[in-house]
Image (spheres, rainbow, N blue to C red):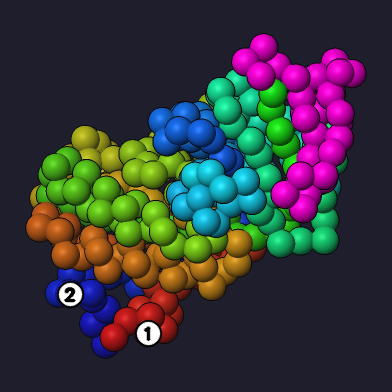
Amino acid sequence: MKLEINGVPVEDTYCEAFDGIYSRLLITAKHRWLLKKAAYGSTALPSTVFGESEGGVEKFVSPEETPDGRQGAIIQIWVQKTKNFKDVLMRELGKRIRQGILVVPTTRLFNATQSENYIDAEINVGRCGDGYEWEEEMWGRKVIRIPIMFGEFIIERYLGYAEGIAGGNVWFFCESEEAALEAGEAAVEALKNMEGVITSFDICSAGSKPETKYPEIGPTTNHYYCPTLKGKIPDSKVPEGVKSIPEIVINGVNIEAVKKAMYVCLEVASKVDGVVKLSAGNYGGKLGQHKIYLKDIIEEYGE
């Protein structure tokens, strides 16, 4: 059976996803521009491949959905599932909260993770009050009030973490950069209000591969799929006429959320003129704990 969506061919392949650990957090602020600054600033720079963290904005929420009655944003911060993941998560949360949220005027931070596992924010964030911070119960939650020069920063003391699925992905083979940007933007936009998922890179322009000539610097370009190398290397896998291949990388609180998000991306991209093929990236099954087959998600979520 020919695999396609809206007449666009879909490669019969799979994406390779990984077990990861995430913390789902709720930021609130007095004004929208401050909220966006904190949400996007604290989740920028994906760096899990370097043993650090990555994040993304899941969705923005109304004042009716927040503890303190102010507008909010739900974000996710992810680390790799390793033996010392809790130490890494503690360090990374502290870094991103203190440098990306606390320093933005009027912000507050609350737990939004449904889990029995928690990190004590008093250790990695609360103590930046230099001993002048104090604990109270506000909005039915235990919070730490940290005095700062602008006024104060309020953070819920116990921030949850849980296990999820990281690195789900889809690829769009496009006839031009313009088509690639349109398809990528449509995919990211379609996921903005989907529960439980983030796109840590939004439109990712540079997929990588595990083998490299320079292991000391980490992952390098996936040269098989670089359009500018077609005709210059004998093993190019870029089809004729393809000028750009964007990737959408998806993390989700469970594999069902990732699968649904992948299908949504494929479906919306298939409607963009200039998208000639849909696919996904993997590492030959060598690295990830999960294989998500495009054929399976099309059968499950397609009409």
Q: What stretch is highlighted in magenta?
A: 123-151
Q: Residue furthest right?
A: 131
Q: How far apart are marks 1 and 2 (CA)?
A: 14 Å
Spot occupied by residue 123 in the image (x, y as percentages of width and height): 86, 31
Mark closer to the chain start, 1 or 2: 2
Dot 2: element: loop
**Given the current orientation, which residue lies at the most extreme top position?**
149
Let me know if residue 136 is in the magenta part: yes
SS label for mark 1: helix
Residue 138 within the segment the image draws in magenta: yes
Residue at image mark 2: 6
* Residue 78 in sight in this render: no
- Count residues near mark 2 (Cα–Cα under 10 Å), then give few for <14, some for 14-19, many for 20+: few
Q: Where is residue 258 in the image (x, y as percent from the top left)?
A: 50, 65
* Residue 144 visible within the image: yes
Q: Quadrant of the N terminus?
A: bottom left
Q: Is residue 257 left or right of residue 268?
A: right
**x 66%, y 19%: residue:** 151
Which is nearer the eye, 102 or 118? 102
User: In this orientation, which residue lies closer to the viewer: 139 or 163?
Assistant: 139
Residue identifier under label 1: 299
Asked if marks 1 and 2 touch (Cβ < 8 Å), the reply is: no
- Expressed as whole percent of the image width and height from the top left, the position of residue 287 reads 61, 55
